[in-house]
Image (cartoon, rainbow, N blue to C red):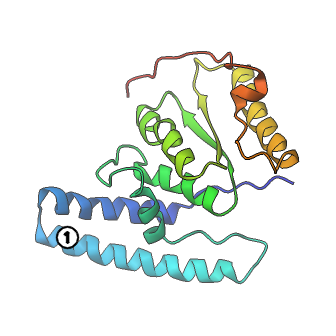
């Protein structure tokens, strides 16, 4: 079977409020804004805690990690001031998936998203250094990427996953390039400036 985990909106909401607090911490700011953001973060975190406890009651579902854990994970590889797009949260979510046993991760990148090149594609090597078992593949979904290229990259990722299942004793991780017999023939593209 194949399981799909999609990040929730609540972590992103906490991230956005926490980013305002990070701005105030890094650059200074309005005391009223800090107070409002602190209250919102407390409220969202309380709601998140209730949500996690509710999900844990049903073993067929995987409860998400709390935001505080995601932030701690991200701090191992990227700075909290990196917040364009989904910022460091995208990196943390990939790390959470691998840590939770979902080692095969597709990082979908829409319309040549430049922030994703940094916090998505750009962090894959660092994440793999911490989690050698991680099998992460970035897939571009924009007009310059063909469907065949996208499907082939996903098929390579699945082939690596299958190979790792059959050769568990192999201490060296198999890469998609090794499985394909050399460097993959991947279309190159220039990221669009947003």
Q: Quadrant of the C terminus?
A: top left
Give coordinates of residue 72: x percent, y percent.
Answer: 42, 65
Query: What residue is at 79 percent from the left and 39 percent from the top?
Result: 158
Q: Please indicate whether residue 23 sits to the left or right of residue 182 in the image.
A: left
**Quarter of image, res 62:** bottom right
Compared with 171, 121 (above or below) is above
| Nearer to us in this view, 169 or 60 | 169
* Other-residue count near label 1 (Cα within 10 Å), few / some / many at <14 / 14–19 / ≥20: many
**Quarter of image, res 60:** bottom right
Query: What residue is at 43 percent from the left and 56 percent from the top?
Result: 74
Query: What residue is at 52 percent from the left and 39 percent from the top?
Result: 125
Residue that numbered label 1 is attached to: 34
Give coordinates of residue 102: x percent, y percent.
Answer: 69, 56
Q: Quadrant of the N terminus?
A: bottom right
Q: Please indicate whether residue 28 sits to the left or right of residue 66 in the image.
A: left
Compared with 193, 72 (above or below) is below
| Nearer to us in this view, 25 or 127 | 127
């Amino acid at each position: 079977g194949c399981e799909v985990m999609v990040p929730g909106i609540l972590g992103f909401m906490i991230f956005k409020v926490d980013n305002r607090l990070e701005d105030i911490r890094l650059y200074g700011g309005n005391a009223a804004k800090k107070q409002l953001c602190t209250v919102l973060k407390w409220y969202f975190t309380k709601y998140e805690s209730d949500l996690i406890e509710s999900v844990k009651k049903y073993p067929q579902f995987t409860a998400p990690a709390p935001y505080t854990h995601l932030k701690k994970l991200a701090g191992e590889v990227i700075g909290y001031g990196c917040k364009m797009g989904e910022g460091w949260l995208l990196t943390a979510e990939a790390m959470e998936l691998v840590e939770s046993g979902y080692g095969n991760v597709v990082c979908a990148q829409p319309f040549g998203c430049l922030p994703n090149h940094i916090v998505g594609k750009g962090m894959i090597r660092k994440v793999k250094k911490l989690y050698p078992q991680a099998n992460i593949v970035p897939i571009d979904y924009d007009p310059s990427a063909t469907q065949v290229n996208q499907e082939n990259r996903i098929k390579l990722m699945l082939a690596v996953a299958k190979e790792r299942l059959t050769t568990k004793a192999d201490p060296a991780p198999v890469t998609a390039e090794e499985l394909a017999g050399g460097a993959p023939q991947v279309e190159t593209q220039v990221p669009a400036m947003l």
